[in-house]
């Protein structure tokens, strides 16, 4: 079977591009087919996007290294008229506030604007700065550096243009900036890298909405990934490891789609993506396969709304006419459930959980961390288990909402190619990158620095706490806390300090210069230190920073831990040891001020303990490499996996009935179409809740779009536990680790 290209375009236009995306909705779709059909899709999406006044652009893996998220942003950024958007925003604010812009579409010096509007220049500038503060600087859904960049571009519309030089801000946005120092006066503190690339793309989507562009359509051509050869210009060339990195970028887009405003990503791919050479298809990366492959499908009809659609000849019965589907919060939830991924926070809270024992224990743990109970004793983390689709990720998201309500910084870390559990620096970087506190879309360490500057007593107390040698922290950390409120550092310097706390490098000569300028050079003997020691100390310092900044603590959620099974024996051993540390399974290595949860599949232990005998083989393997502590910690973690994991309850009829009613309500309010009253569906032992929900939604999609009911077939996707050395290879150049 399959869906004709023209038919899918009509459905995409009606269901997504006409009203849903312009209203703020987002979705990710993968379209697989022959080259000729994909070119029709590409051209059709461009046309439909323009009809809906959406910004449209094409990103090709043959010319863009799409396995690094920042390169996807740069490719999109090259298609954006940044100065034109700034011009539009400024002119709109002038009109909104009763002022005239004498030359529409062109920059006008402030003096000429004041004269034209018969107002004092200083008063007009004050008004403009107020508009910029309220309209951009306080829009926290955009990252701070991005906000500063947009303010700079808007102010540039009030200055005579210099045609001989490109503004450094544009170079920064396009990825061509050589040194961040050129943007010191903006201020912008960091280049766009893997660490902040996704936040920048989210910021762009929000900015487009602010300037009156309702959204963006990105056509991402992945066909080149299936070829080991170079692109047309000699690069890029994708190794199997780089292919996995690209799949991880796509996986993150799918999981985070609800965080974007007005964003429609359509991936164009050949059949090889699904069933081609194993190391270059989604067969190699089960995390992506489980999100795309149709484990729940209609027997007689293809669902054009499925996450992955195969193109083919036209089929009769598809309703190509009908009303355009609007945006709604309920629709966002249905899109996530259709893809089998957890929805946004509000929907997660609404859907709730029946795992009340786990919930109550976790909430009590939050209170213990927040209140510093038990004499500051660490709160041991927990492992939850369930088969694929049992609702583990939903439960983590639901408990994360509890943590946010208790004023915790929350980091969800999905173990992946980009974030291997055996690499503590990568895990910490991911935890910082994914950290959230409220609705902010910014680096958590920069938020912490801003809050510490307003909490001088807490700042000084933390400095005193980590200054003595017996604290175990290198002197550079206390020195940086000492410097923060001093006049010797500017906004760019503070951004560099924030990045250092988050894992970037920072040259000691620069720190000594700051200390010298503050008259404090004799207070701190920076000495020398190993990067590995700093990495361990950053993990311990982070929750102390969060608490000093007024947060209750740090909550970490580790998902898809079963990927450990795909590592080599040695890296599995290191991963077990890291798991013991992050989950505070041994108080000697616990991280004060944190609470953590982990989720993995139920049959993980059968694979690694029953078949590979990890409990017998891993400890001596680590001891043979003089990793005695790691051996001990790995043993503790493996014992917890074997005997201490809590299995999720299997859904009973009552729970399934409530879920069916809730999903039906969401679907009706998404499409204005009332699903027929029907039963829960086939109940069988071991059937996870994901299969029920996807079956309901798929059945309703078919009936709404084809006008007929069909049998829904379920073919569970097995979890792949085979070792894969490509998963252990570094994820691209470490350009996010440049000196801060």
Image: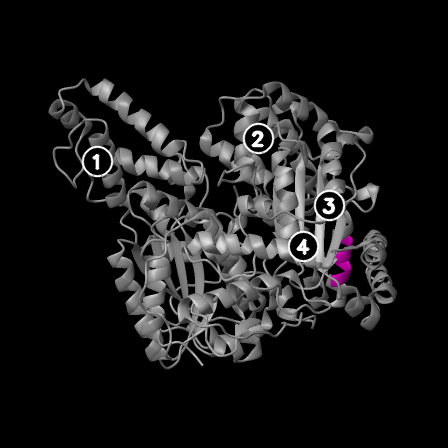
Left or right, 390 with reference to 64: right
Q: Sort mark 2 into few (<14), some (14-19) or many (20+) by Cα contacts within 10 Å.
A: some
Choose the circle earlier in sequence order: 3 or 2.
Answer: 3
The reply to whether the C-beta atoms of the residues labelled 1 and 3 are less than 8 Å apart is: no
Give the mark toward the camera: 1 or 2.
1
Q: Which residues are magenta?
A: 572-577
Give the mark toward the camera: 1 or 4.
4
Q: Which mark is residue 356?
A: 3
- The scheme the figure's colours follow is one colour
Choose the circle earlier in sequence order: 1 or 2.
Answer: 1
Alpha carbon distance from label 1 to label 2: 46 Å
Q: Is residue 245 visible?
A: no
Q: Sort mark 4 into few (<14), some (14-19) or many (20+) by Cα contacts within 10 Å.
A: few
Alpha carbon distance from label 2 to label 4: 61 Å
Q: Secondary structure at mark 3?
A: helix
Which residue lies under the disc numbered 1?
A: 91
Choose the circle earlier in sequence order: 1 or 4.
Answer: 1
Alpha carbon distance from label 1 to label 3: 54 Å
Q: Secondary structure at mark 1?
A: helix
Which residue lies under the disc numbered 4?
A: 655
Choose the circle earlier in sequence order: 3 or 4.
Answer: 3
Indicate whether residue 380 is drawn in magenta.
no
Q: Secondary structure at mark 4?
A: helix
Q: What's the residue at 28%, 62% (across, down)?
A: 48
The reply to whether the C-beta atoms of the residues labelled 2 and 4 are less than 8 Å apart is: no
The reply to whether the C-beta atoms of the residues labelled 3 and 2 are less than 8 Å apart is: no
Which residue lies under the disc numbered 2?
A: 512
Q: Position of residue 178 (x, y in %)?
A: 39, 48
């Amino acid at each position: 079977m399959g869906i004709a290209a023209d038919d899918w375009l009509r459905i995409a236009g009606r269901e997504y591009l006409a009203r849903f995306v312009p209203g703020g909705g987002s979705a990710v779709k993968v379209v697989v087919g022959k080259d000729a059909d994909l070119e029709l899709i590409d051209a059709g999406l461009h046309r439909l996007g323009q009809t809906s006044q959406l910004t449209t652009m094409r990103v090709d893996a043959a010319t863009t290294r799409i396995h690094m998220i920042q390169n996807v942003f740069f490719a999109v950024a090259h298609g954006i008229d940044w100065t034109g958007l700034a011009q539009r925003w400024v002119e709109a604010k002038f009109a909104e506030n009763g002022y005239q812009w004498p030359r529409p579409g062109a920059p006008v010096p402030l003096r000429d604007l004041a004269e034209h509007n018969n107002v004092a220049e200083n008063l007009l500038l004050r008004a403009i700065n107020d508009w910029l503060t309220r309209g951009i600087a306080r829009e926290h859904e955009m990252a701070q550096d991005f906000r500063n960049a947009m303010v700079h571009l808007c102010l540039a519309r009030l200055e005579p243009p210099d045609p001989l030089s490109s503004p450094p801000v544009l170079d920064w946005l396009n990825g061509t900036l050589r040194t961040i120092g050129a943007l010191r006066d903006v201020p912008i503190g960091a280049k766009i890298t893997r660490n902040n690339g996704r936040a920048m793309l989210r910021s762009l989507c929000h900015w487009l909405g602010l300037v009156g562009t309702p959204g963006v359509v990105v056509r991402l051509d992945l066909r080149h990934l299936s070829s080991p050869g170079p692109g047309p210009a000699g690069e890029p060339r994708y190794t199997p490891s780089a292919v996995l990195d690209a799949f991880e970028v796509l996986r993150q887009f799918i999981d985070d789609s609800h965080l974007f405003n007005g964003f429609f990503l359509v991936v164009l791919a050949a059949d090889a993506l699904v069933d081609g050479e194993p190391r270059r298809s989604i067969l190699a990366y089960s995390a992506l396969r489980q999100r795309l492959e149709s484990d729940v499908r209609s027997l007689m009809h293809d669902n054009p709304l499925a996450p992955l659609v195969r193109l083919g000849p036209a089929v009769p019965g598809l309703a190509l006419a009908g009303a355009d589907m609007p945006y709604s919060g309920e629709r966002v939830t249905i899109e996530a459930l259709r893809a089998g991924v957890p929805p946004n926070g509000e929907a997660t809270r609404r859907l709730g959980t029946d795992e009340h024992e786990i919930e109550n224990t976790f909430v009590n743990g939050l209170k213990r961390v927040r209140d510093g109970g038990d004499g500051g004793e660490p709160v041991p983390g927990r492992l939850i288990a369930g088969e694929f689709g049992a609702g583990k990720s939903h439960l983590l998201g639901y408990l994360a909402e509890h943590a946010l309500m208790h004023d915790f910084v929350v980091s969800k870390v999905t173990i992946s190619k980009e974030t291997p559990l055996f690499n503590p620096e990568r895990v910490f970087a991911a935890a910082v990158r994914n950290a959230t506190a409220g609705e902010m879309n910014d680096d958590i360490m920069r938020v912490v620095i801003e809050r510490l500057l307003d909490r001088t007593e807490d700042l000084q107390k933390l400095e005193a706490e980590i200054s003595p040698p017996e604290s175990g922290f290198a002197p550079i950390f206390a020195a940086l806390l000492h410097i923060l409120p001093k006049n010797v550092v500017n906004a760019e310097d503070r951004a560099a300090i924030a990045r250092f706390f988050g894992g970037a490098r920072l040259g000691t000569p620069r720190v000594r210069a700051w200390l010298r300028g503050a008259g404090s050079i004799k207070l701190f003997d920076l000495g020398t230190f190993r990067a590995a020691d700093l990495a361990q100390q950053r993990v311990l310092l982070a929750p102390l920073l969060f608490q000093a900044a007024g947060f209750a603590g740090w909550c970490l959620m580790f998902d898809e831990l079963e990927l450990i099974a795909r590592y080599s024996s040695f890296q599995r051993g290191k991963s077990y040891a890291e798991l013991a540390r992050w989950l505070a399974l041994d108080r000697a290595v616990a991280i004060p001020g944190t609470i953590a949860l982990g989720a993995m599949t139920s049959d993980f232990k059968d694979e690694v303990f029953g078949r590979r005998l990890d409990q017998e083989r891993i400890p001596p393997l680590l001891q043979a490499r003089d990793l005695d502590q790691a051996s001990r910690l790995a043993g503790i973690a493996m014992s917890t996996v074997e005997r201490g994991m809590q299995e999720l309850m299997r859904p009973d009829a009552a729970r399934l009935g409530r879920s069916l009613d809730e999903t039906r309500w969401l679907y009706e309010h998404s499409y204005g179409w009332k699903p027929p009253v029907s039963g829960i569906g086939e109940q069988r032992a071991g059937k996870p809740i994901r299969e029920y929900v996807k079956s309901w939604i798929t059945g309703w999609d078919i009936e709404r779009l084809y006008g007929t009911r069909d049998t829904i077939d379920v073919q569970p996707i097995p979890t792949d536990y085979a070792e894969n050395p490509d998963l252990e290879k570094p994820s691209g150049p470490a350009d996010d680790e440049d000196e801060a």
